[in-house]
Image (cartoon, rainbow, N blue to C red):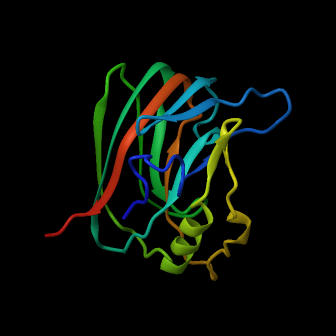
Amino acid sequence: MLENGNFSKGVANWEMAAPSEVGVTPPDAKIEKGEFHLGKLKASSPGYITLNQAVNIRKGKKYKLTYEAKGEGAGQYLVALHDPGKLGHVSKLFTPTASWETIVVEFTGQFDTDGVWVRQWLRATKGGKLKEGRTVNTTLHEVREPRGDAPSRTWLTFAIGGLDGSIAIRNVSLVEVLK
C-alpha cells in the first residue's frame, strides 16, 4: 500500500516539505543505505517539517503502519494518516530513542480515500530528489484536488518539526490487516 517505504529509490513517491523563508537553515536531509536521515533540526511546530506520501485507505478496514526510527536530541514528532485540515484516521506523538526502535500503529479507516487522487500524487512524486532540505523535481502542482467537501485525501505524514537534533526513519510499511 506504500511506495518506496525502504527508500531504495531515494525520496521517490515521498514529499519532504521544509521552511523556505530567508534566514531559516533547512534541515540536512539525505538517504543512506535505505534510511531517511534528517539532521540540524531546530524545534518548532511539528508541522513545520514533514515527510508525506499519499495512501489509499478504506472506511472500516483495519490497517497496520510499521516503521523503524531513531534520533538524538529533544522533542517529539507526530505520525498521522489524515486529510489535512479535515479528518484523520490516526495521529500519535513519539519521542525518538538513540537506538533503532520498531513503531507499530494500528487503526481503522475513518473515510474512503480517492484512489484517482492517490495515483496522480504517486505519479507526480515519482522523480523527486532531495535538495536544500526539501524534495524537488516533482509535478505536484499538476495533481488535482478531489472534488466535494467530503474528506477524500489521505496522507501518511511524519511531522518532524517538533524535534531539536536528528532523526532517521527506515522500513516504512502500511498493510491492511485481514480478519
User: In this orientation, which residue lies closer to the viewer: 110 or 30?
Assistant: 30
On screen, 47 above or below 39?
below
List x then y, in percent, for residue 83: 54, 63
Farthest left residue? Answer: 179
Q: Residue placed at 54% from the left, 66% from the top?
A: 122
User: In this orientation, which residue lies closer to the viewer: 31 or 28?
Assistant: 31
Q: Residue placed at 53% from the left, 58% from the top?
A: 13
Q: Is residue 59 left or right of residue 55?
A: left
Q: Residue placed at 51% from the left, 57% from the top?
A: 53
List x then y, in percent, for residue 37: 50, 32
Q: Quadrant of residue 143?
A: bottom right
Q: Quadrant of residue 103?
A: top left
- Can residue 34 be seen here? The reply is yes
Q: Is residue 66 left or right of residue 10?
A: left
- Looking at the rendered structure, the number of numbered marks drawn on it comes to 0
On screen, 23 above or below 88?
above
